[in-house]
Image: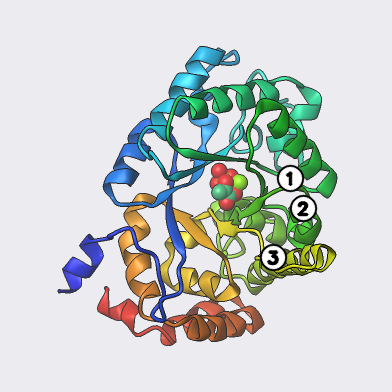
């Protein structure tokens, strides 16, 4: 029976009290997308588009890009696919976009920032995404990586509008974005927490350095506090816009697409912090779904508050795991 819990994911992400949480897949191309669809992912929460660019010495053509994106979209007709625009630089260098002589590439011109040094590549990518979306049935959302200010969010939203893409969003992977999510969400429709980079930047610890692995841990309470601040910003933004419009407004979606979402105990914490979706490698979906079904939203919230208040990553992890007996049952 234990084995069947882990083998089967029926596409339904929910807590023990029935509250819903979309469980989505991180994919890096059409083959991943087909596997994720076969694993019952409800959609794609992160399409890393670097697959289409890496290994090329020049920018891929419009036709090549459309075909590459359409290959992913076609695996999810009628479902959401969140496309992350090109995240070149730092751990993902690209010869025609990034400067390999930068002294601190992780703090350099990477992600959305390349639009100011090499204008045009992003607009052309958005045009290709829009064409691929128009030729498929997927519900396509787009988000920019490495957004640091509300002005960048507004500029990205304007580029999306020009391309005819109606649901622009931002990744929250820089502490400044987490702390200003309210203003970001005034300018775009959703946010997605990239906990890999958010951890690297919160802890000032290069994600590629093995000796810094203990710092580079999304259980670090400082990282959890930034996630909490991001969700609180979304709630504040909704309240403010509702009072202007004199009507109720639900907070705009705030998901998680970093590796943290694939850790079942951490997934419970993220649910307790109030995120609206979790996107992960498709392999992780069954275990995450199974553990989420064992806790109510209230229980998840209590565990999350204790984790945020912990003095170390180890303390946060231990106390949450101790509150989740289902973890040991699932092996
Ligand atoms: C992240 O930073 O958490 C993320 C999802 O993006 P990537 O790992 O591709 O930088
Ligand atoms: Mg990132």
Where residue 99 sits: x, y (%)? 73, 25
Q: Distance of mark 2 from mark 3, alpha carbons?
A: 16 Å
Q: Distance of mark 3 from mark 1, alpha carbons?
A: 24 Å
Instruction: Tell whether 284 sits left or right of 110.
Output: left
Q: Nearer the viewer, residue 209 or 187?
A: 187
Question: Pointer 1: what residue?
Answer: 147
Instruction: Tell whether 77 sits left or right of 261.
Output: left
User: What colour scheme does the image use?
Assistant: rainbow
Whichever of callouts 1 and 2 sits on the residue coming sooner in the sequence is 1
- Of discs 1 and 2, which sits in the foreground? 2
Asked whether residue 175 is in view, the answer is yes
Where residue 217 sits: x, y (%)? 57, 64
Residue 240: which quarter of the image?
A: bottom right
Tell whether label 2 touches label 1 (CB within 8 Å): yes
As helix, strand or loop, the secondary structure at mark 1 comes to loop
Q: Distance of mark 1 from mark 2, alpha carbons?
A: 9 Å
As helix, strand or loop, the secondary structure at mark 2 comes to helix
As helix, strand or loop, the secondary structure at mark 3 comes to loop
Question: Pointer 3: what residue?
Answer: 249
Asked whether residue 110 is in view, the answer is no
Question: Pointer 2: what residue?
Answer: 184
Where residue 204 sits: x, y (%)? 72, 57
Whichever of callouts 3 and 1 sits on the residue coming sooner in the sequence is 1
Query: Which residue occupies 47% across, 54% down?
Result: 279
> Quick check: 92 above or below 4?
above
Residue 211: which quarter of the image?
A: bottom right
> Quick check: 224 above or below 155?
below
- Of discs 2 and 3, which sits in the foreground? 3
Query: Which residue occupies 65% across, 37% down?
Result: 90
């Amino acid at each position: 029976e234990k084995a069947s819990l882990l083998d089967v994911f029926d596409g339904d992400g929910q807590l023990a009290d029935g509250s819903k949480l979309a469980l989505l897949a991180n994919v890096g191309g059409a083959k991943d997308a087909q596997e994720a669809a076969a694993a019952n992912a409800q959609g794609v929460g992160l399409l890393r588009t670097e697959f289409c660019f890496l290994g090329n010495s020049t920018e891929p053509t419009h036709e090549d890009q459309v075909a590459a994106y359409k290959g992913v979209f076609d695996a999810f007709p009628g479902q959401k696919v969140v496309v992350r625009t090109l995240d070149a630089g730092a751990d993902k260098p690209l010869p025609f976009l990034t400067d390999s002589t930068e002294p601190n590439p992780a703090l350099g011109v990477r992600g959305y920032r390349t639009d100011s040094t090499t204008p045009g590549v992003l607009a052309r990518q958005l045009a290709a995404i829009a064409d691929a979306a128009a030729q498929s049935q997927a519900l396509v959302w787009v988000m920019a990586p490495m957004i640091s200010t509300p002005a960048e969010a507004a500029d990205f939203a304007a580029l999306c509008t020009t391309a005819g893409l109606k649901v622009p969003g931002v990744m929250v992977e820089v502490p400044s974005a987490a702390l200003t999510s309210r203003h970001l969400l005034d300018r775009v429709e959703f946010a997605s927490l990239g906990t890999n980079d958010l951890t690297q930047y919160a802890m000032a610890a290069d994600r590629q350095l093995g000796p810094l692995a203990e710092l580079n841990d999304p259980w670090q309470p400082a990282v959890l506090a930034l996630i909490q601040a991001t969700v609180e910003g979304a709630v504040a933004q909704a309240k403010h816009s509702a009072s202007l419009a004199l009507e109720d407004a639900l907070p705009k979606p705030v998901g998680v697409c970093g590796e943290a979402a694939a850790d079942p105990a951490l997934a419970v914490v993220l649910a307790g912090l109030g995120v609206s979706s979790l996107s992960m490698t498709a392999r992780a979906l069954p275990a995450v779904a199974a553990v989420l079904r064992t806790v109510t939203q209230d229980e998840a919230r209590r565990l999350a508050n204790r984790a945020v208040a912990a003095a170390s990553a180890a303390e946060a992890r231990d106390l949450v795991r101790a509150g989740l007996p289902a973890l040991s049952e699932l092996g």
